[in-house]
Image: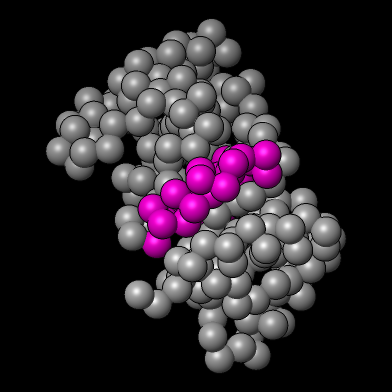
Amino acid sequence: MKPINIALVDDHKIFSKALENMIVSNKSFRVSLIGDNGEDFIEKLKNTNSPPEIVLMDVRMPLKDGIETTQYLTDNYPDIKVIALTMEDNEESIIKMLKAGAKGYLLKDINPEVLFDALETVHKKGIFYTDNITQNLLKIKTEEKISNELIATLKTTEKEFIKLACSEMTYKEIAEKMFLSPKTIDGYRDSVFTKLDVKSRVGIVLFAVKNRLNV
């Protein structure tokens, strides 16, 4: 079976080398490209005859960070799948990476088995939601029929709230945008959490991205 082509984009060269050694120890994968940052990676990608199938992308990098680079790949190389591999475990970074097109989000302290599982899953199914980040932040209903039924239960104002929740606005700013009180917005948030069976704002974004809501 042909190994899956992996690219690494990280400005920490020691970590990048250690990660490369770990990946190539598994015959199911090969590392075909390494970038020191997003700008360096994009330049190398344009000149390679062996583009990666999956990119392990750091979030915080100089010149062009992981969010910008992921968005560039989504727009210009949609067949390349991105998995964030980072120390950034805050909600804002997760939301931005998912909105940019990342198919998974992993922390750098994961064990090799989880990483290999993520690579295999993204390669076969296109998305990886079973890592520690998403397990702790949400429980998402994935069956299409259930999702459609859930969407049908949402009120117009709740859909507007979801759209704004997928932005960088604070809940206070969302309240001002919708000309509602913060208390009313809290009610919408709690209602949406219950209907979608999610536990955080990240859960809302994941649901919206997965179900192609206009966010």
When the figure is inspected, residue 180 is found, relative to residue 80, above or below; the finding is above
* Residue sitting at x 64%, y 50%: 85
Q: Say above or below: 136 vs 20.
A: above
Question: What residue sits 60% from the left and 77% below the top?
Answer: 32
Which residue extends farthest top? 183
User: Which residues make up the magenta segment?
Assistant: 95-123
Q: State the quadrant of the N terminus.
A: bottom left
Q: On the picture, is 99 further left or further right than 197?
A: right
Q: Residue at x 49, y 33 (%)?
A: 134
> Chief secondary structure of the magenta span?
helix
Front residue of 98 and 124: 124
Residue 21: x and y in percent read 67, 63
Q: Quadrant of residue 181?
A: top right
Does 67 appear in magenta? no
**Residue 50 in sight in this render:** yes
| Res 38 → quadrant | bottom right
Position above or below: 215 against 2: above
x and y, in percent, of residue 192 in the image:
38, 21
Position of residue 177 measured from the top left corner of the image (x, y, whole percent)? 57, 30
Residue 102's x, y, as percent? Answer: 52, 54
Q: Is residue 53 visible?
A: no
Residue sitting at x 29%, y 31%: 141
Q: Nearest the camera: 144 or 56?
A: 56
